[in-house]
Image: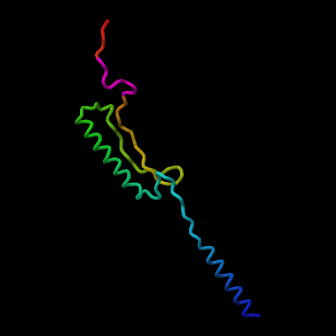
């Protein structure tokens, strides 16, 4: 009877240990990163693209108000993951809904 009891105890211990070591995988929502280091290359790529676009638009004669502005940074989101955001501090005010190429005015 003792060998049967020992086998049962050892078996139940092995099952308990095997079941308790489940790894919980965290699902990262789309657009977010698990770590700041994971998101930094995305921010760098966005910043480089914005700088290239800005340079091309300046050559074309686009006014400062219409140029892309700001810097891309990695910030911690409220959900605990990391995300790339654009910081617009220091950017000029946009022209709103004004026509960038108005027609000649007709004086009456």
Looking at the picture, tell me which residue is in the foreground, 79 or 8: 8
Determine the residue located farthest toward the top in the rendered image: 108
Q: To which quarter of the image does residue 4 belong?
A: bottom right
Q: Position of residue 72 (x, y in %)?
A: 38, 46
Determine the residue located farthest toward the right in the rendered image: 1
The chosen color scheme is rainbow
Residue 79 in the magenta stretch? The answer is no
Q: Position of residue 20 (x, y in %)?
A: 62, 73
Q: Is residue 79 left or right of residue 6?
A: left
Q: Quadrant of the C terminus?
A: top left
Determine the residue located farthest toward the left in the rendered image: 59
Start-end of magenta stretch = 95-103
Q: Position of residue 62 (x, y in %)?
A: 27, 32
Asked if 18 appears above or below 10 in the picture, the reply is above
Q: Main secondary structure of the magenta part?
A: loop
Looking at the picture, tell me which residue is in the foreground, 11 or 65: 11
Q: Residue at x 53, y 59 (%)?
A: 27
Asked if 14 appears above or below 59 in the picture, the reply is below
Q: To which quarter of the image does residue 56 belong?
A: top left
Residue 98 in the magenta stretch? The answer is yes
Q: Residue at x 38, y 54 (%)?
A: 40
Q: Position of residue 103 (x, y in %)?
A: 30, 19
Q: Residue at x 32, y 46 (%)?
A: 49
């Amino acid at each position: 009877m003792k060998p049967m009891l020992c086998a049962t105890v050892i078996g139940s211990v092995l099952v308990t240990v095997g079941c308790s070591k489940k790894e919980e995988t965290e699902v990262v929502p789309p657009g977010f990163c698990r770590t700041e280091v994971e998101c930094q290359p995305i921010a760098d790529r966005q910043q480089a693209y914005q700088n290239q676009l800005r340079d091309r638009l300046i050559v074309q004669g686009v006014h400062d108000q219409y140029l892309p502005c700001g810097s891309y940074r990695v910030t911690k989101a409220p959900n605990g993951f990391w995300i790339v955001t654009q910081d617009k501090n220091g950017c000029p005010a946009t022209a709103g809904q004004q026509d960038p190429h108005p027609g000649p005015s007709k004086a009456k």
